[in-house]
Amino acid sequence: MKNMKVNNGILEIGGVSVTDLAEKCGTPLFVYDEAELDEKMMTFQKSFQSDIFQTQVIYASKAFTCKAMLTKLNGYGFGLDVVSGGELYLARESGFPMAEIYFHGNNKLPEELRMALELGCGTVIVDNLMECEELISLSKEMKKSVKVIIRVNPGITAHTHKYIITGDLDSKFGVTIHKETMILDMIKKCQENKYTVFQGFHVHIGSQIFDLAAFDAAIEVMVTYLKSMKEKHGVETKILDIGGGFGVRYTNEDEPREIQEVCQRIVKKCESELKKNQLTIEKLMIEPGRSMVAESGCTLYTVGYQKETPNKSYIFIDGGMTDNIRVALYQAKYDCDLANKMDAPKDKLYSVAGKCCESGDILVEGYPLPEAEMNDLLVMYSTGAYGYSMSNNYNRIGKPAVIFAKDGNARLVLKRETYKDQLRFESDEEVIV
Ligand code: LLP
């Protein structure tokens, strides 16, 4: 977090003391450094530019979304990647321009496609032939136009430091690039229907990618592909969408490249590949999620009881896998501190465990912290992406509140879920069948 300071041993984020935040809003609490969020958005906007073609940054709303976030993104002129009727609905309720929405997903339900057409969603990123046919038939029935991008699987998978060409051809996403007849069939079907306007291709090669050579490889494969589609089949591609997946720093072991470098490298590589192949496109797009929000967000917890076992010293916190499933799911690593004892020596190794009825509900293991006491505040850094958005209600634990802090002020952007909120799903047991 960039705008973080320590004052009398107490952490301040965006000029607001975490003890004040915890007192006013309770914990667990997601806190975003709003100035850093703005800075990230600005950097994406400024760095992803070309003199040769148009560029657009599409934010992957799955990483973290709420009305305040969407208003901010819209202010920077970004597009939005949504993956469900729910994400689309929020965009609509936030007044996000529908023309700038890109609807993703491998199994968009017919009713979700219907909703997208009804609301005037700009582009559907079609994942497979059956979906393409469903979209075409709905667009005819509803007489609603939509732009279409086809998601292809380029046979490159990248994860963190490694990437493999002809990687996961069995991925559930996209049409494998080798299925030329099928892809041509999808394009032809879109072109024969006056309501579906074929625009180009999309690829997304993975998550938390540090090795920028993986994006070079994806661009090479895709531009070669565009050339062969044009020369062999007369297919003109207007849009190339390279997806997201740019790495972030969770702990000091992670060494991500600066956003500016990532953006400029993608643009330059695309410019040079197009030139080499004597091709042009109208627009290049990227879809960052994590890299826009992860490092600007943290989670505050209150320390409760402690327990010594033969090999571990546990401190228990008031959240856990309900607000951060990434540790249990991906063995994700995080850094943390006792936010009210920032200047104290860290001379004890603690395992920080959540309160869920699940042995795997541990957020960090053997981590150096100052001697902990009940009601200390624990801050876990870089939880801004896929934390709140993957939060769940296991054990009927409510979702945390979310705060944006900037210049000494904090505003509540998402309220804490109450016990009563959870009752809204209870039905009066009306007999249906
Ligand atoms: N575009 C597409 C088509 C995607 O599938 C994704 C992520 C993104 C963009 C954004 O990727 P990002 O820049 O955020 O890496 N829950 C996992 C991450 C799942 C990502 C799925 N797709 C996690 O917490 O690590």
Image (spheres, rainbow, N blue to C red):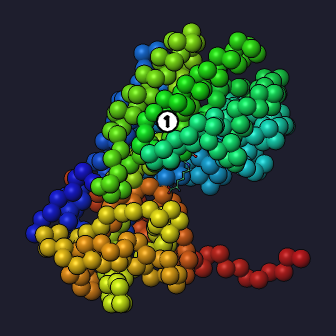
Q: Residue at x 49, y 22 (%)?
A: 270
- Observer able to see residue 172: yes
Q: Position of residue 199 (x, y in %)?
A: 66, 25
Instruction: Judge the density around disc 1: few (<14), some (14-19), many (≥20) Cα neighbours within 10 Å.
Output: many
Q: For numbered disc 1, what is the local secondary structure?
A: helix
49 or 206, which lies in front? 206
Q: Residue at x 49, y 36 (%)?
A: 214
Q: Residue at x 41, y 68 (%)?
A: 401
| Total count of labels | 1
Q: Residue furthest left?
A: 8
Q: Is residue 8 left or right of residue 276?
A: left
Q: Position of residue 274 (x, y in %)?
A: 53, 16
Q: Is residue 228 left or right of residue 418?
A: right
- Occupied quadrant, residue 339: bottom left
Residue under pointer 1: 214
Kindly tell me whether mark 1's CB lies below 8 Å from ligand 1.
no
Q: Quadrant of the N terminus?
A: bottom left
- Occupied quadrant, residue 224: top right
> Is 407 above or below relative to 143?
below
Q: Residue furthest right?
A: 433
Q: Quadrant of the C terminus?
A: bottom right
Q: Position of residue 302 (x, y in %)?
A: 32, 78
- Observer able to see residue 341: no
Q: Which amino acid, mark 1?
A: Ala
Q: Position of residue 379 (x, y in %)?
A: 30, 68
Q: Residue at x 60, y 26 (%)?
A: 222
> Is 159 above or below relative to 156?
below
226 or 1, which lies in front? 226
